[in-house]
Image (tube, rainbow, N blue to C red):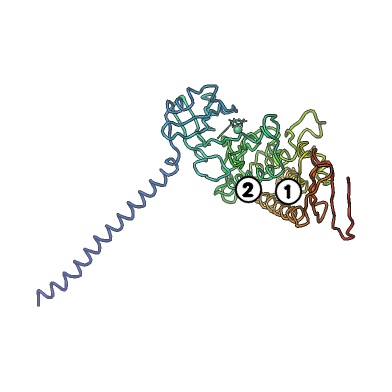
Amino acid sequence: MTARYLLKVEAPIGVSAAGLFIGFLVFFTIKKGCLRKKHLKKDVNTMELRRYRFDELKKATDSFSDERLIGSGAFGNVYRGVLGDEKRTVAIKKAHSESNESAEEFKNEVELLSRVKHKNLVSLVGYCSEPKHKILVYEYVSQGCLLEYIVGKERNPLTWQQRVNLAIGSAKGVAHLHGVEPSIIHRDLKPSNILIDDEFEAKISDFGLVKKGPNGDASHVSTQAKGTPGYMDPAYCSSLHLTTSSDVFSFGVILLQLVSSRPALDHTRRQSEYHISNWAKSSVERGMVEDILDVSLQLEPCNNKMMLKMAQLGIRCTAWEPKNRPTIRQVVKELEEALCQVTKSVQRSSYSEESQSFSIDSVLLQRFYVESFEEISVRSASLRCLDVTISSNNNEEVDGR
Ligand SMILES: Nc1ncnc2c1ncn2[C@@H]1O[C@H](COP(=O)(O)OP(=O)(O)OP(=O)(O)O)[C@@H](O)[C@H]1O
Ligand SMILES: [Mg+2]
């Protein structure tokens, strides 16, 4: 009986001791797991970015030779490099100086870029941080920057579709930055910081000036005004209150440049029209996009309706009062909707069964069926003859030769 009793008493003690032991085991395993996860999480950010030694990057760029130089900016020179082990072509940006400002920009870029990944943002592959060398290593974007297409003479002019596509892609990149928590404000959006890849997609680059947006209920962050003249939001410059709408202002300037291929600031224009938004405003408000359209678009088939929409958005984004500007998400949405509409109407009008080709004096002509003449605008230097049938309410037929 005693034995039974003992057993009876001992059994619960044994069970609870085992339970306690298992409990501790589970607790420590979970805790260890959590710690490991935390450690891993910390590592993920830095692990995805590779840390390079200076001599590796020196080798990758033939000692930072002039033949490898792609361009130069405020932070430093950019070189095309090939990394030996991976045979991967990269862009290597080497700081000009060891100033505190460069070190600050470098740290800023590494920290914030390791938090974001998006197909319309240039990705940071790694970095080199040695006492005398601060170097950033990016994915290589092969087709140059938007500025070269807007003002440069060496690149072919952009078609209207390319302009819209680049606008939508870069707006999506900015929307991704604004959408993370807390938001990331780029502060230096401009055509030289929009790169173009093999598939002619836009990628936002140059994150040296990025700032974390306001936390929680705060409406803005107070910070020194930095950026590039012509693209900087005047409201931010005067109040030093930075919000995502300052990037929207800069983006508006880019939209107007995509339509007109004009500089943001032009001192050859009269003073009241130095800034591109002041120069374009009245034409856009009257719906006269032809007045500001890039000349090269006037020689090619161009959808003026879409260009007008882009210019109108450009004017809204550059509104003086930040509260009157759309968000970048709104910009993406409106551009996509407008493109969808014009694409549908062009398909409906120019490729109907009634389209046919014929020749006069051995010149091959295409006959288009156009539902509404406003829907399509064709201006071509090589267009010798225009034969258009307009189906309007009164079924009027126009035959112009
Ligand atoms: N990832 C990259 N791939 C290919 N080319 C690049 C890359 N990053 C930059 N470049 C090229 O290097 C040039 C210099 O870039 P950088 O951003 O340093 O200066 P910037 O934009 O011209 O001037 P700023 O310092 O005022 O921004 C760019 O114009 C671009 O053509
Ligand atoms: Mg740049």
Ligand 2 lies in quarter: top right
* Residue to which mark 2 is pinned: 219
144 or 6, which lies in front? 144
Task: Please tell me which of labels 2 and 1 falls first in the chain.
Answer: 2
Residue 217 position within the rendered picture, expressed as x and y whole percent measured from the top left: 59, 51
Q: Nearer the viewer, residue 267 or 364?
A: 364
- Check disc 2 and report its element: helix, strand or loop: loop
Q: What count of labels does the image hold?
A: 2
Nearest the viewer among 93 and 319 is 93
Q: Which quadrant of the rendered structure holds the N terminus?
A: bottom left
User: What percent of the width, then of the height, locates residue 392?
Assistant: 86, 58
**Residue contact at pointers 2 and 1, CB within 8 angstroms:** no
Residue reaching furthest to the bottom: 1
In terms of image quadrants, where is residue 157? top right
Q: What is the three-letter code of the residue carrying label 1? A: Asn
Q: Secondary structure at mark 1?
A: helix
Quarter occupied by residue 159: top right
Q: Residue furthest front?
A: 362
Pointer 1 local density, CA inside 10 Å: few below 14, some 14–19, many at least 20: few
Q: Is residue 57 above or below residue 110?
A: above
Q: Is residue 199 left or right of residue 400?
A: left
Location of residue 230 by image quarter? top right
**Could you say where residue 266 lies in the image, as x and y percent from the top left?**
76, 30
Q: Position of residue 172 (x, y in %)?
A: 61, 47
Residue in view at x 74 percent, y 40 percent: 259
Residue beneath the point at 75% across and 57% down: 353
Q: Is residue 120 above or below residue 370?
A: above
Amino acid on which disc 2 is placed: Ser
**Quadrant in which the C terminus is drawn:** top right
Q: Nearer the viewer, residue 262 or 2?
A: 262
Which numbered marker is on residue 324? 1
